[in-house]
Amino acid sequence: MNRFNVGYTSMTEDGNQRPTKRQKTSADANNFAVLNECGISAFFKGQYKEAQECFACAFRSLHIQTPDFTETTSSGSKTKEEYDEGMDIKVSPLPIPDSSTIELTRIILNYNIAQTRIRRGDYRESIVTLNQALTELNESNQKKKKISIRILHSLGYCYYRLRVNSRAMTYFQDALPICLSQTSATLSLAATLNCIGVIQFHESTPKSDMAVNVLRQSLELYETMSSSSTEVATVLNNIGRVYFHSAEYDKALEHHEKALKMRVDLLKKDSIDIAASSFNLGQTYHRKGNLDEALEHFTKFLDILRSRRRKRYADMAMAYRCIGDIHRVKGDLKVALQFFRKSVVAAESSPKGTIQPELTSSLTKLGSIHFDKNEHDSALQCFKEALTVAERSLEVDHPHTIATLTNMAHIYKHRGEYAVALRAYQAALERQERAFGVESVEAAATHSSIGLTQFHLNDFQSAFESYQKALRIRREVYGSDDHLEVASTLNSIGLILFKQESYDMAKECFYQSLRIRKKLLGEDHRDTAVLWYNIATVYFEMGEENVAVKMYREALRVERKALGDEHPDVALTLQYIGRVLLQQGNLDGAMDSFREALALERRRKSDKRALARILNIMGNIFLQQANVKEMMKCFEEAAGIFVSLPPGAAENLVVVGYNFYNLSKLHPPAAPIA
């Protein structure tokens, strides 16, 4: 049988050996060329395992040492269809030209085998084969720019799928000058620019401006070739995603709507890329607060997923979560709960490998809705299951496991199980510091949660230290005190100092926090009212009652403007104004404040305990004014409410009047009854 002339050499004049040009007969060419054509045919039918076997047989027919084409761990089935980002540059296996040399033939067959492995998800094996092809191409004297671009694109795609973006970027950047050097490579240049833009968008710190610039160059090139191509729609979709993550939602909507219109015109109605555009529009409308439009697009996304013969359960779980979130924001917790349950069921139906992250997210959402409904036991159970799933499939320090552990800690804290909550927060902090760094904003947030838990445990010194760590990190990260998280931390430190009776230092912290909030939120924001209230309370404790009343009245003004006259905070501040006036002996002024608070609580009809407490205080004021009739009316109503409270929640009526002689001296109107 005739074969390539591999072993024969000729001598040069300087005595060095070099290979002679390898010749092949028509019989040889027919053998491996036919096998290669059979592989190409199988490839286009989606029979990637069969295609790979054909290409490997073609390699063996060359009668030279062949690479290892043994079966990998892949099942041989078609890999999951991905949403099109334009990264999988759809190049087909190459035919072998009649004039092909043995070097070029080997390169083409390596490339073709790599394509079948890529389609089967064997990215690491593909990289080995592609690198062999690239090495042989570089070592040969042939300048085959077209196939070198294809090899570099395929290597970039494999590394992208393996999430090694830095290596992927290297290969796409290597392809760029080759594309620029060829006047006929406009399509390859547009594809390469798109790939570079997508990777810039996916970097840990997205280079959004650079990504948009590169993607726009790609878009312009594609549009010069065809104004209605699927590639144009893909790049429009990519640009929209960059704008979405940059919070430029109007620009994101503009590009996603164009992409969706083009895809609807060009693709089948159940196309996964139409679904992707619908989902992207749903996300964007959701962020803009257009809930009905968001729900419409999320529902379209879900309908397409349901209509497909091959169910994408992980994506269906995501769709159910998004729809559940819409109903949650709308306040329809019952419907939201139903969709989150569907999300869990869909995630549990996902193929092995996709189930874990989707199931973790779905269980977390289900736990959150139970928490919103004050079903803390059910919420905790969901979070525990989510943590078990996450720890079984993800790294210990994965953000999912940290978030779930933090959610559990929140519930323990809400239930008053502060010691258990503290341990959970500390475990989350250890993972955050490994995952994000000791000086990360995530660690600062957990330091704050730990500080609050320690505060509830009356461990004020430890709480102070935890908040100080949070403050130091936040100041370092934000580079300024002018940030709301800094303001919040200063307020928390002020509360601890107040508890420790360090009133001057507490007051200083509150004033700093007030300055920041007034600057960032305005003077009439409800959060500034909190600071006015805290500052007033410090002055009250310090005995500076006139200043305290002034500060409380400013808090009251802001609360009424920001929250309305019927808000419970208004009633609370009115009561504190009354307490200060009562302390000053201004019984009439105190009574006016308590009457106003009482009227508000009667209108609210939501907190009987608060109503009874106000009545109790008013009864004592009437006692001091010797108004026995009004005193008895207040005491009787208050006592009736206290007695009606559930067991364990009942309170006793408090009568301040046992020292009637001193009472008559302090308040002369009370002398007759004394």
Image (cartoon, grey):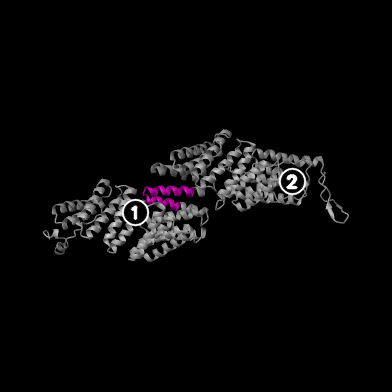
Q: Nearer the viewer, residue 477 or 422?
A: 477
Q: Amino acid at mark 1?
A: Ala
Q: Is residue 252 above or below residue 546?
A: above
For badge 2, the amino acid type reads Lys
Check residue 51 in the rendering and tell me which mark sits there, or answer none. Answer: none
Residue 419 visible in the picture: no
Badge 1 element: helix
Residue bearing the label numbered 2: 144
Q: Is residue 377 magenta?
A: yes
In the rendered view, tell whether residue 171 sits above or below residue 275: below
The label shown at residue 529 is: 1
Q: Please provide the residue range marked out in magenta.
A: 359-385
Residue at the (62%, 40%) spot, across then down: 220
Q: Indicate which disc, 1 or 2, sits on the residue closer to the N terminus.
A: 2
> How far across and down, in percent of the image, does residue 538 sit?
31, 61
Which residue is drawn at the image coordinates 63% and 36% (left, top)?
226
The residue located at (52%, 42%) in the rendering is 251
Q: Residue furthest left?
A: 672
